[in-house]
Image (spheres, rainbow, N blue to C red):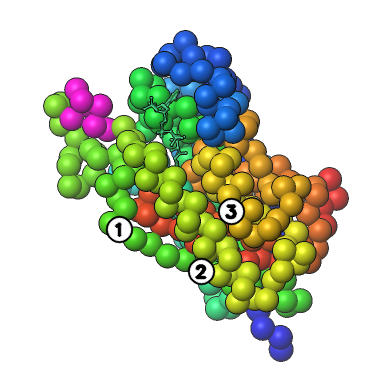
Amino acid sequence: MSKISAAITAVGGYVPEYVLTNQILETMVDTNDEWITTRTGIKERRILKEDGKGTSFLAIKAAQDLINKKGLDPEDIELVIVATATPDMKAASTAAFTASEIGATNAFTFDMDAACSSFLYGMSVAASYIESGKYKKVLLIGADKMSSLINYKDRATCIIFGDGGGAVLFEPNQEGLGLQDEYLRSDGTGREFLQATYGGSVHPITHEAIDQGGQYAFQEGRTVFKNAVFNMADATMKVMERNNLTKEDVAWLTAHQANKRIIDATADRMGLEHEKVMMNIHKYGNTTSATLPLLLHDYESQLKKGDNIIFAAFGGGFNWGAIYLKWAYNSDN
Ligand code: UT7
């Protein structure tokens, strides 16, 4: 019997309706459309405005989109992983709630957090369960309500992030399609440069912390930028080299959408034409765990069975890496 590989067999996505444009941000902080566009490539982002709705709302919508498109019976799903840096609540799992709401009543569930690399690492975890032969239907969702972590008075962060969710189904494949290789790394000395300091176990939330905005995400953009450019390109090149992939062999780069300049630098290092680079940062900004599945959702109709796709991400932690995957189906959209 040929080896079991883990293939993506369906994709879903969701972004909230409210559009936060650069022009609106100009009225909120000292910034301008020209600066944001040239420094980041972002024109607008989506924000989940409704009270009482969190990351699970985005995750449920993305999963339901996948379930409807695939005609999947949710009771057949065996595992639901929600990759997120903004879980609904402390302690109560976002994945458990999401699974119940979509009718995945036979699944076990857990959340995974590796900041902006959550979905990338989630692909490795989901694929391992399939490759082991233990499970046949693993739903991996990447969703983040980043607006819940953002101080809309801090121009260094509020221009970048947006809300969204995306989902993929992993199933066994015996044609050699699906996940081929991965290079994943972490460096905890980077955590001082990108974090939401208060609200965790080191610094529980206090009145004083809230008065200083300590519950919001903070980043030292320049340091994060430099590390992202180096490490995303390095991981991508390692995966290409050890699989003997030339730039002609690569159909698509599916890279984390934090800054267009970081994505361009990675593509340039690979020698890849920009038509092969998936891009949605202009309309969604950085949706953290949702960026990779939302790209697949947006580009699904252009993907062909056998396409070699390189995924890459970098984020808080620091956590980063690259994954090489062969696409497993032609879309009928
Ligand atoms: O997904 C998680 C990982 N996150 C990332 O990968 C983010 C990586 N970092 C970045 O994308 C970029 O560093 C930023 C977009 C956050 C900032 O861009 P930059 O080119 O690194 O700008 P900078 O922080 O070096 O600031 C340059 C100038 C400064 O002014 P002076 O000191 O040169 O006068 C800033 O005060 O731009 C100013 N500035 C702004 N101006 C208008 C910073 N933010 C803004 C703003 N609007 N929003």
Could you say which quadrant of the image residue 18 lies in? top right
Residue under numbered circle 3 = 266
Residue under numbered circle 2 = 183
Whether residue 161 is in magenta: the answer is: no
Query: Quick one: label 2, few (<14), some, or many (20+) residues within 10 Å?
Result: some
Q: Is residue 171 left or right of residue 152?
A: right
CA separation in Å, label 3 and label 1: 22 Å
- Segment tinted magenta in the rendering: 209-215
Q: Position of residue 129 (x, y in %)?
A: 53, 71
Mark 2 vs ligand 1: CB below 8 Å:
no
Q: Residue at x 15, y 26 (%)?
A: 207
Q: Earlier in the sequence, mark 1 or mark 2?
A: 2
**Amino acid on which the number 1 mark rests in the picture:** Gly
Q: Is residue 190 left or right of residue 84?
A: left
Q: Secondary structure at mark 2?
A: strand
Determine if residue 115 is in view: no
Determine if residue 187 is in view: yes
Could you say which quadrant of the image residue 205 lies in? top left
Query: Quick one: label 1, few (<14), some, or many (20+) residues within 10 Å?
Result: few
| Placement of 155 over or under 305, stated as above or below | above
